[in-house]
Amino acid sequence: MDASDVESDLVNILFTEEQIQAKLAELAKQIEADYDGKDILIVGILRGAVMVMADLARAFHRHLEMDWMAVSSYGSGTKSSGVVRILKDLDTDITGRHVLIVDEIIDTGLTLSWLTSNLASRNPASVEICTLLRKPEALRMPIDVKYVGWDIPNEFVVGYGLDYQERYRNLRDIGTLAPHVYS
Ligand code: 5GP
Ligand code: MG
Ligand code: MG
């Protein structure tokens, strides 16, 4: 791989920076209306949700708090390991709080379904999920996702926080990788 030519590894751009920003503004507006008069704690799931958190948070015109969790569900490749572990827990006591989990993508839904019940057991006022992307597989999980940017086909995507072997997170657009990257 030519480290100086990251963008050219994307063969198909699904969403541009502009489309992503417009979508996040739309979601923020909807969330602001739904949580009118309530304090919100948004919880970003490291590391993929860093870009979504940064841009979604700045699309709000109201106060909110931000915290982070890190969980492991995938290895370094493109397949789910089926194991969820907390690598970094919240610094915030969420008792009585309105918690909004922010993630960049839901694939099988395994990670977030596990995380939602974990957070729900800490007696928050509410727990909802906001994800930029969702794959069809996730629709078969008993997981209620209140805010979804886009439903996408079952393809492996990178960019805007999404990695392949820890690379491509820094791309501004979201797309699929050229076959030569995998070989
Ligand atoms: P799930 O537990 O929903 O199957 O997977 C959740 C995590 O898997 C996501 O937060 C993300 O880190 C990773 N993941 C799932 N699908 C994709 C994908 O298409 N591209 C990338 N880069 N990561 C993905
Ligand atoms: Mg994630
Ligand atoms: Mg990953």
Image: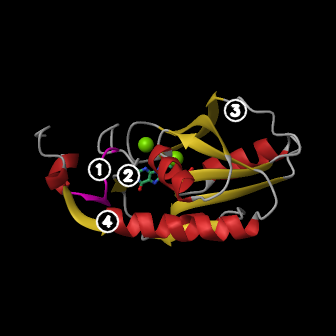
The residue depicted at 31 percent of the width and 65 percent of the height is 16
- Element carrying mark 4: loop
Distance from the alpha carbon under mark 4 to that under mark 1: 10 Å
Distance in Å between CA atoms under marks 3 and 1: 27 Å
Q: Secondary structure at mark 3?
A: loop
Report whether residue 134 is seen: no
Q: Is residue 89 left or right of residue 19?
A: right
Labelled pair 1, 2 in contact (Cβ < 8 Å): yes
Dot 1: few (<14), some (14–19), or many (≥20) neighbours within 10 Å? some
Which of the marked residues, 3 or 2, is nearer the chain's N terminus?
A: 3
Question: Which mark is on residue 16?
Answer: 4
Residue 172 on the magenta segment: yes
Callout 3, which amino acid?
Leu
**Left or right: 81, with 119 as reference point:** left
| Camera-nearest residue between 59 and 12 | 59
Tag on residue 160?
Answer: 2
Tell which circle, 1 or 2, labels the residue nearer the N-terminal end. 2
Q: Which mark is residue 171?
A: 1
Q: Amino acid at mark 1?
A: Leu
Residue 147, image x, y percentages:
63, 66
**Amino acid bearing label 4:** Thr
Residue 19 in the image: x percent, y percent?
38, 69
Look at the numbered disc 2 and give the secondary structure of its residue.
loop
Check residue 90 in the rendering and tell me which mark sits there, or answer none. 3
